[in-house]
Amino acid sequence: MSTINFEEIFETKLAKNEMIEPKDWMPDNYRKHLIRQISQHAHSEIVGMLPEGNWITRAPSLRSKIVLLAKVQDEGGHGLYLYTAAESLGISRDEMLDALHTSKAKYSSIFNYPTLTWADVAAIGWLVDGAAIMNQVMLQRTSYGPYSRAMIRICKEESFHQRQGYEAMTRLAFGTPAQKSMAQDALNRFWFPTLMMFGPPDKESPNSDNAVKWRIKRETNDELRQRFVNQTVPQIEYLGLNLPDANIKWNEAKNGYDFSEPNWVEFKNVINGNGPCNKERLNARVNAHKNGEWVRAAAAAYAKKLDDQTLAA
Amino acid sequence: MNHHFKYLLRLADNSLINAQCLCKWTGHGPFLEEDLALTNIALDILGRSKLLLEHAALIEGNGKSDDDLAFHRSEREFLNTKLVEQPTPDYAYTIIKQVIIDSFDLNLYKELSKSKDDVLAGIAAKSIKEITYHYRHTSSWVNRFGLGTEESNQRAQNALNELWRFTGELCETDETDEWAIKNGIGCSVENFKASWQTQLKNLFNESNLTIPENTFMQTGGKNGIHTEHLGYILAEMQTLPKAHVGATW
């Protein structure tokens, strides 16, 4: 009698760049790694609705209000695809939300910074979504099928969001002196937190061998960060804004810009819950869930009544 | 004020203030799917308000834009009904308020799709499709709240008791409405008032909810006499354009 070696099948699929699907056998640590990564990505989308959502009721024109509302809704949609992708690995939505609400699960630390002015909304679209795309483009070819397919759709929408953000920034940078100074202030405040989105420097980054092997990660944090800076500096120059870091300088030898390191002590503090809005973001999510409890209970009770009636009929 | 302009402005303001209130739930909904659904409804209504304000601005004909009308009028110049500006302290208020608006608007915009004002008729035809979905959504929540749990029934009943006094204004007719009816621009609410009320009564009855009786109906919004809530809604909505006069966004 021949035995099937599941691990071998899994490895062969990876080697042939084929997708792993929910019903396929997969190693436990592959499943665990994906559940953690996808659920934390989903949480980032949902928490990410809050800083920009903060300006929906104050958007300064009807068009910008519509654009922002649709954008924040897109983020919610991304959260939904991602939660669903994670569910296909055998974890429930309730378990994932519980991990978020009890701070066991993390989300992107960028959303723990406040949106103080309208320009911050533009800066988030332009810089934060721009950085997110760089991180996420490689995930379109990740090995887990549902995650890969979710990311293909998410990346399309994110690149649209980035253009919307840059457009809004353009209007400010070429607007009145007050608008331009609002744009500069937002760039100054969001620059380093955005650079932190790529994670700690490679020399301090935990070993990511498996992540590379599983096609969950393809480039290092520092490579992605450098690419982001190279792409963004000319955009800042086009806008006529001052560079947010005095050390940004073209380096012919490396064919890229030199720039200052972000403050990694601040990064660790924000990750550990001490950022300017960690408490507010988490409270907002917990309160929404708590205030919605009776709504979900009503829906469940009503669905059960309908089921009972169908059974009785 | 030109009757045609005023008639359009009332429609636009009802949509704008309704959407502005709905927007507050985005990111804070009771669960993710419902958050997305309500935001979708808000987007439709906000889009309609923009179309109506653009058209109203053209009819007014003094070079103002849709944004000028939305962001540079004061409390007394807004002509929405009092119902749309009412706060929604819980999700039952949002659903009860919205189901009243959706059921009314579904009837109203069906009539308006026959308007001699082609632009208004076009906006109305587009809106009917959207409002049909909105009503399906909000009326299904009325069923869930009314027949779900004791708590949800109580919350929905409280909201209905509080909000019903603002429904009378929806059916008021004044000289602007009469002008619009006479000229084929607008429609008579009398054409659908009875069937609208029956529709709502049936929905609430089947959901074990009761429309309060002998309610004294509030009025005034259509003529710019609002509840105190509108001032705060506008203060929030208009803050940037008022602080940066002349700026474009």
Image (cartoon, coloured by chain):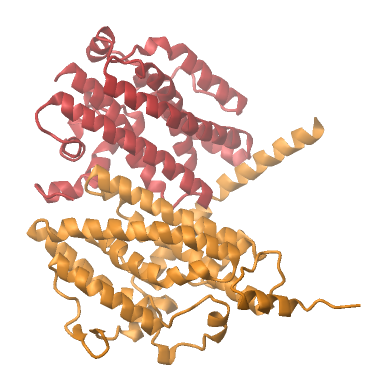
Supply the letter of whichever chain is red.
B
Residue A240 seen in render? yes
Is the residue B114 above or below the residue B63 in the image? above
Is the residue B196 above or below the residue A8 in the image? above
Q: Please, which residue is most extreme toward the front here?
A: A16
| Residue in view at x 39 percent, y 29 percent | B127
Q: Position of residue B90 (x, y in %)?
A: 46, 43
Q: Position of residue B167 (x, y in %)?
A: 39, 23
Q: Position of residue A149 (x, y in %)?
A: 54, 61
Q: Position of residue A275 (x, y in %)?
A: 36, 74
Q: In this image, A182 relative to B89: left or right? A: left
Q: In this image, B6 relative to B216: left or right? A: left
Image quadrant holding the N terminus of chain A, namely bottom right
Q: Quadrant of residue A224?
A: bottom left
Which one is in front, A31 or B239?
A31
Q: In this image, A50 relative to A163: left or right? A: right
Which one is in front, B129 or B156?
B129
| Residue in view at x 59 percent, y 76 percent | A33
| Residue in view at x 57 percent, y 83 percent | A210
Q: In this image, B194 relative to A169: left or right? A: right
Count of numbered badges drawn on the protein: 0
Image quadrant holding the C terminus of chain A, namely top right
Supply the letter of whichever chain is orange.
A
Residue B219 seen in render? no
| Residue in view at x 17 percent, y 30 percent | B57
